[in-house]
Amino acid sequence: MNIKNMLSDKSFLVNFEASSKKNVLDELSKLAERDIKIDSRILLESLTKREKLGSTAVGNGIAIPHANCPYIDKPKVFVALLSNSLDFNANDDQPVDIIFLLLAPDNSGSEHLQALALVSRLLRNKELTTKLRGCKNTESAFAVISQSVREKAA
């Protein structure tokens, strides 16, 4: 499983100015709708339900909201790099500015957990997250992630 296989050039909101957690989840849901034809309202409802169970903020300004999706056959990731930080109810009380939305196929079980672990490991790399915070467009964000994957493989 490789993060680059879960992303496309349509997977990014870069330098996005979000007004709230709901706003950024809504925009990521719309991004997913354009890419995989899922109803963004249904996805937003699923993400909101998941957030009510507990915040998906993992600390250090990062959140990984996630949901199952019946319309895909492999995990997909959508990324929001915010121009402003948002309260995401993180355990470390830090606002969030990097959000990786993970969608996994329905009934994927271990594949969902493997994808979540992969994204989590990737985002523990402080050099990567620092570079992502400096990205001004989709191309640079995708290049930063691709380079990080190549360096890890080397």
Image (spheres, grey):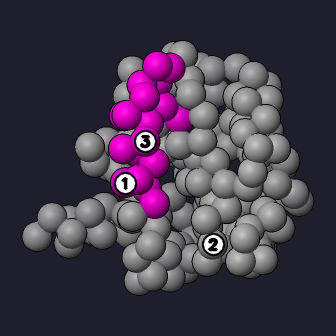
Whether the magenta-drawn stretch holds residue 105 is answered as yes
Dots 1, 2 in contact, CB < 8 A = no
Name the residue at 64% across, 38% down.
31
Disc on the earlier residue, 1 or 2: 2
Quadrant for the C terminus in the image: bottom left
Q: Which residue is mark 2?
A: 59
Instruction: Point out residue 111 in the picture as x, y percentages from the top left corner.
Output: 36, 34
Question: Foreground residue, 18 or 49?
Answer: 49
Q: CA distance from mark 1 to mark 2?
A: 16 Å
Work out which quarter of the rendered image holds the N terminus and state it. top left
Q: Residue at x 68, y 43 (%)?
A: 28
Helix, strand or loop under label 2: strand
Q: Is residue 145 magenta?
A: no
Q: Determine which residue is flagged by label 1.
A: 118
The stretch of residues the image draws in magenta is 103-120
| Residue 33 quadrant | top right
User: Residue 111: in sight, yes or no?
Assistant: yes
Residue at x-position 50% and y-position 20%: 106
Type of amino acid at the residue the image marks with label 3: Leu
